[in-house]
Image: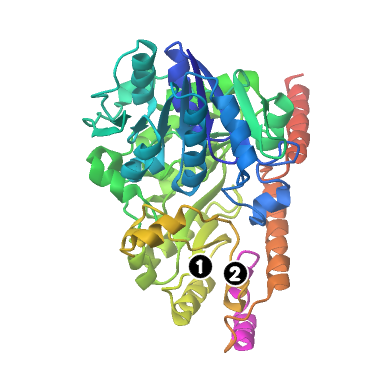
Amino acid sequence: MKVYAVSMDRNILSIGFRRVVAVAKKAGFDVDSIYFLDDFRENTHSGSWWRQKTGEGFGVNFISDEEKVNALAQHLSKGDVVAFSVMSVQRNLCKALCEKVKELNPDIKIILGSYHPTIFPEDAIEFADAIAIGEGELIFVDFLNRVKNGESLEGLEGTWTNIKGKITKNPDRELMTKEQMEDRALMDYTLDNNYIYSAADENVIPLTEKIFYKQVGTVYNTIWSVGCPYRCSFCSQDLLNDMNPEYAQFRGPSPAYMINEIKEVQKRFAIDYVIFYDSDFMGRSLEELKEFGRLFPETGLKFILSGTNPATIREEKMKVLTDAGLVRIKMGFESGNDEMLEFFKRPAKTKDLRKTTQILSKFKDKMVAPAFEMIIDNPLESKDQLYQTIDFLHSLNGPFTLSLFSMHFMPGTALSREQGDDKFVAEQFDKEYMFSYKPHALNNLLSVFAILKPSPFLLKILKKFISGKEEKKFPKLKTFLYRAMLIRRAIDSVRFGDYSNFPAWVMFGYHKSRLLRQNLISR
């Protein structure tokens, strides 16, 4: 039985997808993984390195040509099962592919997983035979076993099924226990049976080592734990928590499991850095982090936290992690105004953010300046509130940089649900979400803090200059400031040997020098 598993993200990271595929392969199924790339000949998943960093020209629905959809559907229709990992912003493309695949092969079975079918099951089940609700590892294996054995999908726990037009919501499935996570297959991080679909070439080709390294460099991307107790209004986590309270708990395997996973990857690929994308890495107990800190140095690598919450930053935890190899951390501040933080339902308010910054500043000699993510272009935020954010940032002590994100009403979030408009939500399925933000004068002033903290006198002058023209656009200034920010970050990163954000060729230069240095020391 041939299974095609398709990740619809425009990259080859797809951490959750890889875990689901790994479990299916361990169960003995023949699975080909297919990743979307717009042009595999370019340096990164969105084309040039610069486009990937700025979001310029980046969009999720990049396969809009019917011929390109048909070309991929033709390939997928040769299988017995097709599984799609789909977010809501990829929904329309996924629907087109599913319908074409079914047209070409009516007997093929299609299952959807990830956030869109979980949050919008009534929509997703209309163009699939089954959808997995929530965690998909065990559901996928049960689904494949039923298809293989010619059994009915009726009653399959954790799914909705569409059997000859009859839609059924089946019983919920229990989430994986810590023991099951400990026993599951290591993430499918290999070139075997891995392919990419290049929209530029309209072709499915093997994922080669050359293409692989161009996409990820010498970085291993992973997630240790799942679950999040917070209910931020711009996130759909609250729906999962309402679905099953266990989604609000941090669940994951032991530190030893994670270290073993990393060591196994090191046997196959050149790795210098590990990036953890947990919702809140620091949410674990100090004891568990100490065990991680004891084991991680065995890998000889450095690591980055791309997901943690300022509400859980503690000095003793930071000391454990920086001693173990932490070189960079980023987290969501979102705003410097308590009214907006309350609106976003953030667990940390400005007094907590200030305390977090004070703690992080104590480790400025051990790691790159932390990056604080901020939400701007918020139609519900006043100019006065944004000025308050600027004043708050100016009052913080210690080095930091900013990552600015334009606010979007993402499908499935409280922000979208509060609109109470089905048409509005449906329109979001076809929007392209970019990293970039509007080049307004007030946004540009905020972006100055990503480069440096201006003196009180300079800040006063800048405020006076933009007063009355906060909405005026300065696109060239935005580009200049963004490039200045990248240069500032690059200089800071070099100080601490963190090349994980650099182009792949730079990472490999560092990798070779690191190995040479290790060989000289060993002699």
Q: Position of residue 323 (x, y in %)?
A: 53, 39
Membership of 291 in magenta stretch: no
Q: Residue at x 59, y 41 (%)?
A: 10
- Left or right: where does residue 122 sit relative to residue 300? left
Give the spatial CA distance, label 2 vs label 1: 9 Å
User: Which residue type does callout 2 highlight?
Assistant: Lys
Q: Position of residue 230 (x, y in %)?
A: 32, 51
SS type, badge 2: loop
Q: Nearer the viewer, residue 142 or 393?
A: 142
- Mark 1 lies on residue: 376
Secondary structure, magenta segment, majority class: helix
Question: Mark 2 against mark 1, which lies toward the viewer?
Answer: 2
Q: Residue at x 47, y 40 (%)?
A: 95
Contact flag, marks 2 and 1 (Cβ < 8 Å): yes
- Give the quadrant of residue 271: top right
Q: Residue at x 55, y 29 (%)?
A: 297
Q: Residue furthest left?
A: 171
Query: Is 326 above or below relative to 147?
Result: below
Instruction: Give the magenta range.
Output: 445-466
Mark 2 neighbour density, 10 Å: few (under 14) some (14–19) many (20 or more): some
Query: Is 429 above or below relative to 126?
Result: below
Q: Total of numbered circles in the picture? A: 2
- Left or right: where does residue 406 sit relative to residue 269? left
- Give the quadrant of residue 185: top left
- Give the quadrant of residue 283: top left
Q: Position of residue 341 (x, y in %)?
A: 37, 66
User: Which residue type does callout 1 highlight?
Assistant: Ile
* Disc ID at residue 438: 2
The quarter of the rendered structure image containing the C terminus is top right
- Left or right: where does residue 150 sit relative to residue 403? left
Q: Position of residue 418 (x, y in %)?
A: 31, 63
